[in-house]
Image (cartoon, rainbow, N blue to C red):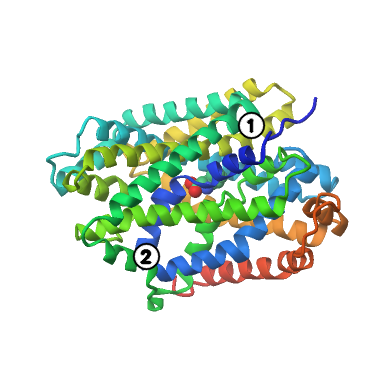
Amino acid sequence: MERESFKSSFGLFAAAVGSAVGLGNIWRFPYITGKHGGAAFLIIYLICVAAIGIPVMLAEFIIGREGRKSAINSFKEIAPNSKWYLSGVLGVLAGFLILSFYSVIAGWTLEYLIKAITNEFAGKDVNAISNMFTEFTSHPVRPIIWQFIILAFTAYIVGNGIEKGIEKYSSILIPALIIIIIILDIRALTLPGSKEGLSFLFKPDFSKVNGKVIFAALGHSFFSLSLGAGTMITYGSYIKEGENLGRATVNIALADTLIALLAGIAIFPVVFAFGIAPNSGPGLVFITLPNVFPKLPGGYLFAVLFFLLLSLAAITSTISMLESVVAYVIDKFNIDRKKATFISISLVFIVGIFASLSNGPMANVPFFGRTFLDFLDYVTANYLMTIGSMISIIFVGWKLDRSMVKKQITNNGILDVGYLSLYDFVARFITPILIIIVFISSIKGLGV
Ligand code: PHE
C-alpha cells in the first residue's frame, strides 16, 4: 500500500506548525520566560532554536523521508542490523509519555474554556481564583473526564489518517489560532501600562543567566519544536518528494517562535498592567489571567478567546504525539490505523489517569521526589527529547551516507541549495557539541 502523504505544502506546514505550536508556546513559554527573567532567556532560547532546533528538525525530516516509516522503523530501514533504532524507541516513548501528561493539562484548558463562557471568573478575588484552580486540578474525577474528551477527539482525528485527519484539521485550526492570538495581542498592546510588559520580554538582563537557565532554554526549544519525540520523523515520512525540506524546516521553526512571541506579547503586558508578578510559574495562565480578565474592558470575550486558543493549540499538538505512537503500532503489528489508534490511546489514557491523579488524591505519592505529572514533564523534556535529538543529529551528521543527505536536501539535485556543506558542518560538530556542553553543565550543577 502506498504511504499516505501531506497533499499540499500548506498542509505540511499547518500540520507541523500545529504540532510545534501548543501549550509549549502559550502556557510553558510565558511562564518559564517569566521565571528566568524575561528577555535574556528569550535571547538564549532564540540561539538554541537557530543553532540546535533547526538543524535537528531538518535531520528528523531527512530520516523520516528517507526511511518512510515510523520513527523506530525509519532508523531500521536506513541502518539495518544496527542499534540506531533505539533513538526511535526513545522518541516514541517520549511521544507516549508526553501525551499522557499533556492531555491532562489540555483537559484543564477545556474546563477553563467552559468557566470563561459561563463567566465564572467574574467577581472573584485572587484567593478564590487560586482555590478554584486547586480544587479543580485536585478533583479525582473532573479533570479525568476532560482528559478523556481531549484524547477521544485526538484519536478521532488521527484515526482519519494523514490527509483526511491531521492535514485537514490542522489547516483549519492553525489559521484560526493565528487570528485569535492577533486579536489578543491588539487588546494587550492597547492597555495603558503595556510598555512595562514589553520591556520585560524584550530588554535583556543578563545577570539572571546561569547554567540552569541555558539548560531550560535548550529543553524548551526541543519541547516547543516537537523534537526528539518521534513526531517530526513520523511527519517527515509523509512529506512528498517535491517539498523543499530546508525551507519547510525554517518556516516551521520561524512560525513556532513567532507564535511564542505573540503569546508573550498577549500575556506580559496584561500581567504588568495589573501589577502581577510575572514569575508565578505554571499557574500563570490558569490563575493570573483569570484574575485579570474580568477587570479588563471586553474581558469576558478575551477570556473566552484565550482559552479557546489554548485548547485548539493543545489539540493540534496532541494529534502529533499520538501519530508518533500510532505509526509505530501500525508498522509493528501490521494492523489498520483505526485499531492501532484505539489501542494506543487506551494505553495513554491509563498512564494519563495517574498523571491527573497526581495533582489530587495521589499528590503525596512521590515519584523520584516529584509528583508523577511533574516527573513525566521533567524526564521527557530534559532527558528523553534531548538524548533523542542528539542521536538524530549524530545519525545524520556521521552515519548517513553524504549522498543520501544531499539527495534529501536537494531533492535529488533539483534544488540548488547553498547551505549543504554548512549543514554538514553544523550537524557533525556545532549542534552535537552545543547539546553536550549544555547537558553536562546542567548535570554538573553549574548554577543549578
Ligand atoms: N511542541 C508542542 C508544544 O509546544 C509539544 C510537543 C512535544 C508536541 C513533543 C509533539 C511532540 O506544545
Q: Return the x and y of residue 117 as percentages of the image width and height.
A: 26, 31
Q: Amino acid at mark 2?
A: Leu
Confirm or reject: label 1 Cβ below 8 Å from ligand 1: no
Residue sitting nearer the eye, 239 or 144:
239
- Residue 312 marker: none
- Which element is circle 2 on? helix
276 w.r.t. 157: above or below: below
* Quadrant where the N terminus is found in the figure: top right
Determine the CA span between mark 2 and mark 1: 38 Å
* Quadrant where the C terminus is found in the figure: bottom left
Q: Residues within 10 Å of mark 2 (few under 14, many from 20)?
A: many
340 w.r.t. 370: above or below: above
Q: Residue at x 39, y 73 (%)?
A: 204
Instruction: Please indicate whether residue 248 sits to the left or right of residue 269 in the image.
Output: right
Number of marks in the rendered image: 2
- Residue 326 marker: 1
| Residue 424, picture quadrant | bottom right
Q: Which residue is mark 2?
A: 201
Q: Return the x and y of residue 439 as percentages of the image width and height.
A: 57, 66
Name the front one of labels 2 and 1. 2
Q: Amino acid at mark 1?
A: Val
Instruction: Please indicate whether residue 161 sits to the left or right of residue 28 in the image.
Output: right
Please indicate, yes or no, whether residue 100 appears anywhere in the rendered image. no
Q: Return the x and y of residue 246 as percentages of the image width and height.
A: 70, 55
- Whichever of callouts 2 and 1 sits on the residue coming sooner in the sequence is 2
Instruction: Please indicate whether residue 157 sits to the left or right of residue 413 in the image.
Output: left
Please indicate, yes or no, whether residue 221 appears anywhere in the rendered image. yes
Q: Return the x and y of residue 374 as percentages of the image width and height.
A: 42, 49
